[in-house]
Amino acid sequence: MFIGEYSHTIDEKGRVSIPSKFRGELASGCVVTRGLDKCLWVYPMGEWQNLAEKIAELPITQKNARSFSRLMLAGASDVETDRIGRINLPAYLREYAAIKKEVVIVGIYNRIEIWPADVWANFKNEMEENSSEVAESLSEIGF
């Protein structure tokens, strides 16, 4: 399980260090892809397989299903942690998320999200200010 938030820096080759407590689950490889909200999502290989199978089952006759499939699958890249726990973020994914140097790595249970530090700070502040409204809207789905 991935939880917590950690500040890191992207090096000149596009590598970022994964927090040490997350590395074990990524040791056998992982997939990084475009996430929603203009961040990157990193999945351990098993979780990625589960997600990819669900995406493959979406009806190709529906435009939104095709678009979502393209966003998630065409943008995906297999990556491995190196001997010191870094992964290489491909340039097209860094561009998608507007990642330059400072990032925040966020654990979201079954995935990791990588955000530009300034964008994460703005998102977090907005969520903290609106947390009551968000919680209330979730009650509609049984939370």
Image (cartoon, rainbow, N blue to C red):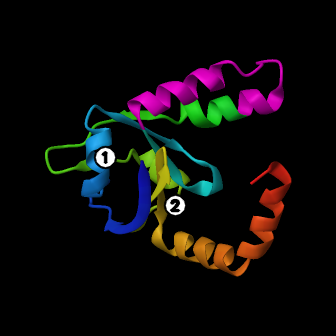
- Tell me if 40 is positioned left or right of 80 in this view: right
Chain part drawn in magenta: 44-67
Note whether residue 123 is visible: yes
> Could you tell me how many numbered marks the image carries?
2
Mark 1 secondary-structure assignment:
strand
Label 1 belongs to which residue?
Answer: 88
Question: Residue at coordinates 25% horizontally, 42% vertically from top-left?
Answer: 81
**How far, Cα to Cα, is label 1 from label 2?**
15 Å
* The quarter of the displayed image where residue 65 is located: top right
Q: Which amino acid type is marked by label 2? A: Ala
Helix, strand, or loop for circle 2?
loop
**Viewer-proximal residue, 59 or 102?**
59
Image quadrant holding the C terminus, namely bottom right
Q: Predominant secondary structure in magenta? A: helix
Q: Residue under circle 2?
A: 98
Q: In screen coordinates, is 36 left or right of 108?
A: right
Q: Is residue 27 above or below residue 86?
A: above
